[in-house]
Image (cartoon, rainbow, N blue to C red):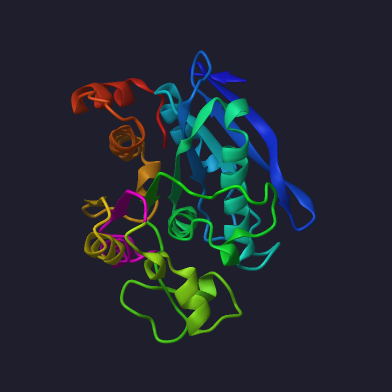
Amino acid sequence: MTEGRVQIETDVVFGVGGGRDLRCDVYTPPGGAERAPAVILVHGGAWRQGDRTQLRGYGILLGSEGYVCIAPEYRLTPEAPWPAQIHDVKAAIRWVRAHADRLGIDPERIAIEGNSAGAHLALLAAGTQDVAAFEGEGGNPGVSTHVAAALAIYPPTLFSAGPRERGAVPLLALTEEGDDEVARLAGPLSHVTADFPPTMLIHGTADETVPPLASIRMYEALVEAKVPVELHMYADQPHAFDAQPAFGRQCAAEMLLFLDRYLVPGNDESAAEVIAAVDAAPDVG
């Protein structure tokens, strides 16, 4: 189908999980794509709910600016326990790279973005590139899960199996079976190294679902590791604040500027031009 001239292909099989097909939606820029940058969009929903249509607005917006966007599903925890979710996201990354020619993308310019639980999965994938314990068996074995950039909106970055650590989310939100080691390995904060890709973090200061300190601590760790990182804090905004059209457009403008800086070498488009393009696009909320 066509929406805002962005071509949307739905129900594309990208892998297998739990004996069933895993599907994604693909957003292709107007006029098609050739060696374009790509963004994998990972939805939220507390790992228990939600679906790949949640980030449709971002897919349309970024697609209209030349990015091929891929929105995959992943098995939710009522269907499959942790770590099936990261395995499925990794399968999506491998599929995107393996099918770069079919998608019209540059396999070295793949970014990953997520909201909430999806932001956790995006950061964890970015921090565990090609680490066997997180790869799963969802398809395209041997293909790299390297990503060139990561964007995370109100992300859980650390978990606590016992007394709640500052900035942490209780491990029970992710899995009912786990200890301190499971909590440590599930947290993107534990996987920060100098090899982490350039990262953007966005959070609201009034978030009562995922503590704002989760993003602050991730930012501090990435700074210490000398990774290019930026943190955008929105005053008095709750969890999922970007569902409001004005905030969604602003977040999208910041995402686009960040992606252009790290995925489009030599791009010198001004901030005013990018924001004007976002203002003219459909609402993402």
Q: Which residues are magenta?
A: 196-216
Is 174 a magenta residue?
A: no
Tell me where residue 167 appears, x and y as whole percent: 32, 71
Q: Residue furthest bottom?
A: 163
> Residue 93, relative to residue 154: is it above or below?
above
Q: Is residue 176 left or right of residue 114?
A: right
> Residue 84, relative to residue 144: is it above or below?
below
Tell me where residue 195 appears, x and y as whole percent: 36, 57
Tell me where residue 17 appears, x and y as whole percent: 72, 55
Q: Quadrant of residue 137?
A: bottom right
Is 214 a magenta residue?
A: yes
Q: Is residue 51 left or right of residue 262?
A: right
Q: Is residue 74 left or right of residue 110?
A: right
Q: Residue at x 78, y 51 (%)?
A: 20
Q: Quadrant of the N terminus?
A: top right
Q: Is residue 239 left or right of residue 102?
A: left
Q: Residue at x 48, y 49 (%)?
A: 146
User: In the image shown, does 109 or 186 lie closer to the viewer?
Assistant: 109
Q: Residue furthest front?
A: 142
Q: Residue furthest top?
A: 31
Q: Quadrant of residue 102?
A: top right
Numbered label tally: 0
Tell me where residue 53 appears, x and y as whole percent: 57, 39
Q: Quadrant of the C terminus?
A: top left
Q: Residue at x 39, y 58 (%)?
A: 155
